[in-house]
Image: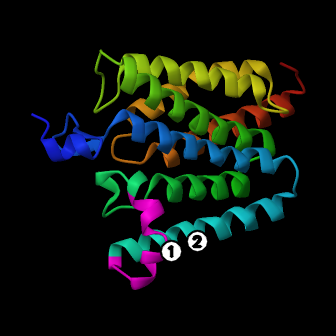
Amino acid sequence: MVSQTQELKGLKPSTKGETEFGYDREVWRKLLHLFALSIPIGYQFVSQTAAVLIVFVCFLGSLAVDLARFRGWPIQRLWNPMVSPIVRPKESHNFTGATFILLSGWLCRLIFSLPAATFGMLVIILGDTSAALIGRRWGRHRTIGNRTVEGSVAFLAAAVIAGVCTPGLPLAIGLALAVPATFVEMFSTRIDDNLSVPLVVGLCSHLALKILAQAGGTV
């Protein structure tokens, strides 16, 4: 049963018994999540070296914020009023989604081709936002953990949109990888999906592009 204190804070118990965001706070968190679109968009306007350097510096900044929370450093008081309302209970002693997605943004552009890195990041940013908002509001059929069928369908739809919108990515590759990307997100219970999805999708699309280039074909 939800306690009066939890209701006042806009929180509710999750299926795992821990306190979780209310929907209004989830909306704000996902709106901030959309700011990460600046990563794949920024890829298109700067060199690989510049993109890797910029995202890495941002990752270090987010990592420092997390470490300050873990260790209770006094400096965290400067940003704690802004950060604490959007930190999930399970992130209180773990790295936040922001840190993981910045790590992904750095690794994707460091390792993969531009279209593959862009696609991997677009899938998680658009897909995770859609899955969370649709799943939390209309999700009725549970699958794995807190995932729902409705949320996964929303993720799939967003992944398809990401494939259509990724510059330089053949449409067939984007559409073909939308389904496996959805399953990766669904089964990412031990590894943060902000890390697993971009890296798996980026790797698969990178390899697919290489195979296509070697075959000299077009899609």
Q: Main secondary structure of the magenta part?
A: helix
Point out residue 53 in the picture as x, y percentages from the top left corner. 74, 68
Residue bearing the label numbered 2: 60
Q: Secondary structure at mark 1?
A: helix
For the C terminus, the quadrant is top right
Task: Give 69 or 125, whichever is nearer the viewer.
Answer: 69
Is 67 positioned to the left or the right of 125 in the image?
left
Query: Measured from the top left, where is residue 120 in percent x and y?
Result: 65, 39
Q: Is the residue marked by circle 1 packed among few (<14), some (14-19), or many (20+) residues within 10 Å?
A: some
Say which element carries label 2.
helix
Which residue matches tag 1? 64
Question: Can you say which quadrant of the picture contains the N terminus?
Answer: top left
Q: Is residue 97 left or right of residue 201?
A: left
Query: Which segment is the magenta one?
Result: 71-84
From the top left corner, tell me how far across and down residue 194 is, in percent: 51, 46
Q: Amino acid at mark 2?
A: Leu
The residue under label 1 is which amino acid type? Answer: Ala
Total marks drawn? 2
Q: Residue at x 59, y 53 (%)?
A: 104
Q: Residue at x 70, y 36 (%)?
A: 119
Look at the picture and state if 42 lies above or below 145: below
Residue lying farthest left? 1
Question: In this view of the protein, which residue sits in the foreground, 65 or 160?
Answer: 65
